[in-house]
Amino acid sequence: MFERARETVLRETRLALEGIDAESAARFVEYILNARKVFCTGVGRVLLSLQAFVKRLAHLGIDAHYVGEITEPALTKDDLLITGSGSGESIFPLSITKKAKQLGAAVVHIGSNPKSSMAEYTDLLVRIPVRTKLALDDEIDSQQPMTSLFEQSLLLFGDSIARVLVEKKGLDLHKLWQYHANLE
């Protein structure tokens, strides 16, 4: 039973990651590299995936935060907000996205719905074309519970982007440990 479930998850995440437009991913990397600070927002398991991405960005020497953390600094026009929301309709991420745009920050939405309410407030959509609560016709279907495939794909997409950032910044993987927590 586990083997069948594992193969389902691996097959689905591979399909989802292969469905992400390479040009959008490249533009996303440039937004990160050009930002003074990077902020992420989402809710639930999406937020957990983004928090892992924030931690990885910090390991790469990038000033990164998630919205709501106790030490969150002010967002400015020189910063980037990354909003994760499969449907693009979740109330909290949508409100934060609107506010970030009002403050003049660049905004990237990582989601599945290209026609979401978030579209008018974002500079770039990185589409992970997987099943959301909206069940759009062109979404990749999933045998997993609810939006697991989106959250998994978001986490793996973040790790893929981190690898690109390592290459773009010419970072030495062995020297990255200087950014890792050391009170463990």
Image (tube, rainbow, N blue to C red):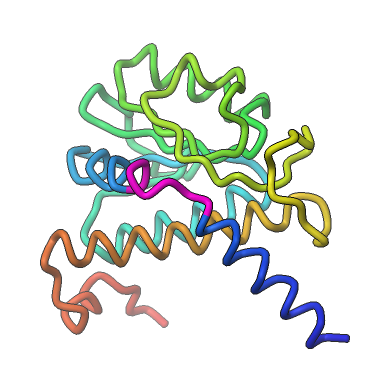
Q: Is residue 61 above or below residue 96?
A: below
What's the residue at 42%, 38% (across, down)?
A: 82
59 or 165, which is in the foreground? 165
Q: Is residue 182 left or right of residue 152?
A: left
Q: Is residue 40 left or right of residue 3?
A: left
Residue 80: say if magenta. no
Q: Is residue 159 left or right of residue 173?
A: right
Which quadrant would the C terminus be assigned to in this image? bottom left
Residue closest to the far front? 138
Which quadrant would the N terminus be assigned to in this image? bottom right
Q: Is residue 153 above or below residue 37?
A: below
Specify the quadrant of the image occupied by residue 60.
Answer: bottom left
What's the residue at 82%, 86% (across, down)?
A: 2
84 or 127, which is in the foreground? 127
Q: Position of residue 134 (x, y in %)?
A: 77, 32
Q: Is residue 76 left or right of residue 112?
A: left
Residue closest to the far left? 170
116 or 176, which is in the foreground? 116
What's the residue at 25%, 79% (across, down)?
A: 177
Residue 20: say if magenta. yes
What's the residue at 24%, 22% (across, down)?
A: 77
Magenta span of residues: 19-25
